[in-house]
Amino acid sequence: MSQLARFTSGIAALMLLAASSAVGQTIPAGALLKHQPSGTTNYVFNSSVMLTPPAAPADASATIQAAINTMASASLSKGGVILLAPGTYYLAHTLQLEGSGVTLVGVRAVTSTGQNGSYPTLTYDDSLIDDDYNNRSAIETTLGVDVPIIDTPAAIRFNGNADYSGTRTFNYGGLIGINLTFTGTAGSGSEGDTATGLAMNLPHQTLVRDLTITNAYNGLDVGDSTSPYFLNINISGVRGTFGARLGTFNTDAIKMHALTVTASTGNTSTTLAIIPANMELIGGNLSGGGVGLHITGADSTTFANDVYLRSLLIQHTNAQGMLVDFARQVYVSDTTINYAGAEAIKVTPNFYGGLALTNLRTSYTGLSAIRVQRGMNINLVNAVLLNSGQRKSSASSDDLPIADLSVDSSVTSLNVVGGRFGSANGTTVHEDWGMYVSTTSPLYTPWHTPTLIASNIDFLNIPTAQRSSGITITNPSGYYTLYNAGYFNPPAEDGWSLQNLPTDPVGTGVMAVVKGFNLYDLPEIRDRQWIDLTSSSLSTHPVVDSSGNINAANFTYWEDIAANQFPEGAVLYLPAGHFNSSFSSYTRKIYNLSNPLVINHAAIQVLGDGRNITRIRFRISSGSVLSVESHASAPTQGH
């Protein structure tokens, strides 16, 4: 018999022995992290494993901050998860989420009917105190540079270091399942009134999921960052400069899936979202305010470069739906813009490089639907631009004539493939042109003789003489023939997903393309019993010893019991560490694995606390082969 065969046979024998001795047993209560409230089928966390600060109106910020600091400063800590109990908590001071891997997770309530209720709500008012904002002069003097992120107060700060220098010291971590609400007096000018909901400085590969910010002055300010990931961010009632400012020129590789921003009632000035650097935004709903989406760096040396946008709905803005300014290489697809007060999309003379617009729909814009003032390689494919020029009577001479597509003489190349331009039957026609190219002297000299090409364009209720100025159309009136043949599709509302399980949360409309999930709300995890494999209650067959060594046979023993006791499934949990009962100390846990763990029951999940947080070190003896088998479609987090 080979060494590998003997190794595998030995492990199988151990697991068979463990399985046979597990028959008729149950998981000791001390190892169960959840319970079932009376009359429900939900499993919810026991109070002993959740942080429960004093409820409002008492100040909860000190209790939450102490737990964060305890975890971050613990010996060898790489972070972990702090579960915040359902409820409403008042913040008298700004929360500082700092420390590698520290993740604050709000636990959803369970309603009286057994349904999942709301996440914890953190409130702040005019009395909010932000120490970093108040000490900004001293901080900037010490560093010798301006630190823009502390020029305004914030209710929560998520930082990649503790001193606001340019050196990142913390990695990973997250903020999940939190409602943040300003309850003070709007317009009072207080620290709380002018605070940004969440301000981030130098985070690296952080997770922000299921975050709702209500009535904040500014909603989300990402600041300098590297590869943060956002999912399901809802900002409503924003009153200040911006709803979400997604980074700075130094930001790299933001991923934002499902962003909703709504301005406060009557607000006609707030920019709903600002994109100053390379990022990917999929699924966005922006409504009200001034400009819907502003894509721009600070100046001609800091372009917003490589921006990818998909499945956006922008509407009821007082100015442009989308303003493309100091930018280059912007790609927009499957986007609808309705009722923009100015242009649906305006590309300023500050734009360089290429712009691709695919599957675009606009209607009832105040001025021209699309105005391009400069650029090379402007591509418009499958566009339906209707009822432009609703504010024509009050437009300035610079905004005339009104066209569904208006191109200045500084544009070097334009390619339009497939479109329907004009005004719907039975409505007033405000367009002067369907497509218009300015004949005035260019403000900026094109890079070469302009190349303007169009094909397969239908015009609706625009006189023949005014359909196209300066652009020759190939196959005019051919759009619907090709549309009906399947060459031009309407904006997609499905077909892309982070994960596509039958139980994934599903959005509607423009959010339908976003199928990422909050791990803690995935039903296979949220609605199942959790078993702490490190619990001393499992001492008859300890899975993990005091040195962190995992016993594979005992793992199988308890796995078999869990599968029998909880046929709907269960979560086998390896936490990154443990708080004591008062959350005043935290001990990290590092795991060592020498033999394979076999998951051979359906609906059994093995869960850690996240990337680089729960760590399992594999130990392989000389000549041995270690394999990990999985016989269940169970997600595993952490490594």
Image (tube, helix red, strand yellow):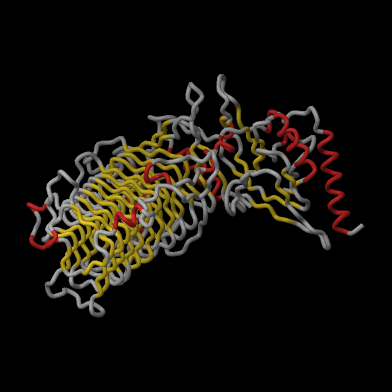
Q: Could you tell me if residue 161 is visible in this image?
A: no
Q: Position of residue 308 (x, y in %)?
A: 39, 59
Q: Position of residue 30 (x, y in %)?
A: 68, 30
Relative placement, left or right, of 444 versus 361 is left
At horizontal 49% and vertical 30% (from top left) the residue drawn is 116
Relative placement, left or right, of 526 versus 589 is left
Q: Residue furthest top?
A: 39
Q: Could you tell me if residue 421 is visible in this image?
A: yes
The quadrant of the rendering that contains the N terminus is: bottom right
At horizontal 23% and vertical 76% (from top left) the residue drawn is 450
At horizontal 88% and vertical 54% (from top left) the residue drawn is 6
Q: Residue furthest bottom?
A: 448
In depth, the one of 460 and 389 nearer the eye is 460
| Residue 179 location, quadrant | top left
Relative placement, left or right, of 498 versus 24 is left
| Residue 577 location, quadrant | top right
In depth, the one of 73 and 188 nearer the eye is 188
Q: Can you say whether 371 is above or below 409 in the image? A: above
Q: Position of residue 82 (x, y in %)?
A: 53, 41
In depth, the one of 268 and 203 nearer the eye is 268
